[in-house]
Image (cartoon, rainbow, N blue to C red):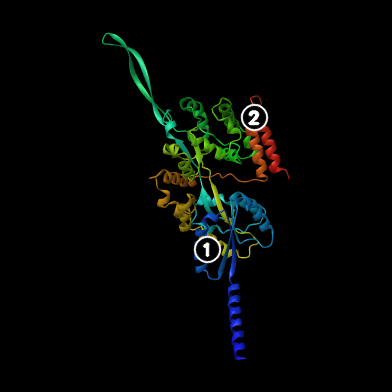
Amino acid sequence: MKKLFVLLLLVITLCGCSANNDDREQLTVWTLQMGDFSEYMERIISGYEKQHPEVDIVWVDVPFSEGEKRTLAAVLGNNPPDLINLNPDFSALLAQRGALEPVPAGKLNAYNPQIVESLKYNGVLYSVPWYATSSVTFVNDELINKTDVGREKVIEKRVLKKVSRRYKWVVEEETKIPYPYPVSYTQMNRNAQRIKNLTGAYIYTPNLVDNDSMLRILNKYGINSPEDVKSSESVQLFEQFRKIYQEGFLPKETISITHREAFEQYMSGKSVFFQAGANFLNMLKENAPGVYAVTSVRPQLIGSLGQYDFSLMNFVIPVKAKHKEQALDFALYLTNSNHQLELAQMTNIIATTNKALNSAFYNDYSTLEGEARSVSAKQLRKIKPVMRQVRNQKELNTLVNTAVQKILTDKDTPVQTILNNLADDWALLIYDE
């Protein structure tokens, strides 16, 4: 009997321990494609759980291709994750549906203010920024040195004068005319013919019909609505692209090329400029060491508004989440300056906190990779106006890309006519209920 009593006591004790473990708050966190950094994630999760013994974090890594579909199903259900890693565009769509919990703006004072502002929907924050990317411009110096781009050209004015009983042509004055690097799409297009004639290479291969690439370019010129897309500035920009494409100063593949295919053209020395994130330098070094050796970096191409483009990943809290307060606390812990810098040193992403952005890591110009990273980080100081997702975004991308292809290939239809039709279709897509 005594042995039986001891056994029952042991069972009760073990059950009691199990019951205490079950009392821990189980926080479910979804990330996108972070499996390659599982050691990093698990270390951070372990550190948080040690500081908060009442919390048990369940980490689920979701493939990019399934992220939006699985997230939508989860937030519309009754048992969503507590914290989800998304891009801002899809986050904004969920905010429009009232599916996300607002984030107090005062909690994000440590983050880059322009990034924070870009995340607002109707003036309200619904997400915590994690990491960003902002492309820079690669330049093939070997090719560009065959031209006068980036140099000063001396223009001499000569007059015929009598010198020592003879008439000679004498330099009366000289003027230095600079030929700066093109910093905008407009300037790039204006230089396309000169660069092709002097180097045999294309000035660049813009991937105008890859997802929302053209919409991002237009946004840099303040063209982001049906009304704007048929404006005189829009017509002029598209007429530029049509002219240099039809005259052979852009590759024929421009009407269908992807970003990766454009990169392959740069790696093969067929284009002088290329825009990409700093991480592409590693691929360039590995696959085209000769081109890497003659590559320098400059800031991203701009439009008439002078702002830079960027991409961002953030965290959101579903409105139906069970542990909202703890989810926000963990999001702030995971995305603090130290953890962001650690991730950046492994991946070349751009951190989003002020402290991290002001660190030596983003002020290093001693290597090509360090320079690209530092230039990219500085660009986050001027990113407004941000291109916003709209209703039926994928359909809008298709409309715009189809119009671009018609403008480049159709020699007869006026650009204004094509853009007027695009404006009508665009308006129907986003305004029609």
In this picture, residue 173 sits left or right of residue 198: left
Seen as rendered, the residue at the extreme bottom is 1
Q: Name the residue under label 2.
A: 416
Residue 376 drawn above or below residue 183: below
Q: In percent of the image, x 40 and y 51: which residue is there?
A: 360
Nearer-the-camera pick, 198 or 37: 37
Q: Quadrant of the C terminus?
A: top right
Q: Dot 1: few (<14), some (14–19), or many (≥20) neighbours within 10 Å? A: some
The answer to whether the residues at label 2 and label 1 have Cβ atoms under 8 Å apart is: no
Image quarter for residue 219?
top right
In this picture, residue 177 sits left or right of residue 224: left
Q: What element carries label 1?
A: helix
Of marks 2 and 1, the one in the foreground: 1
Q: In percent of the image, x 61 and y 29: which residue is there?
A: 408
- Amino acid type of disc 2? Gln
Q: Name the residue under label 1.
A: 45
| Image location (x, y in percent) of residue 182 | 47, 33
Work out whether residue 233 can be spotted: no
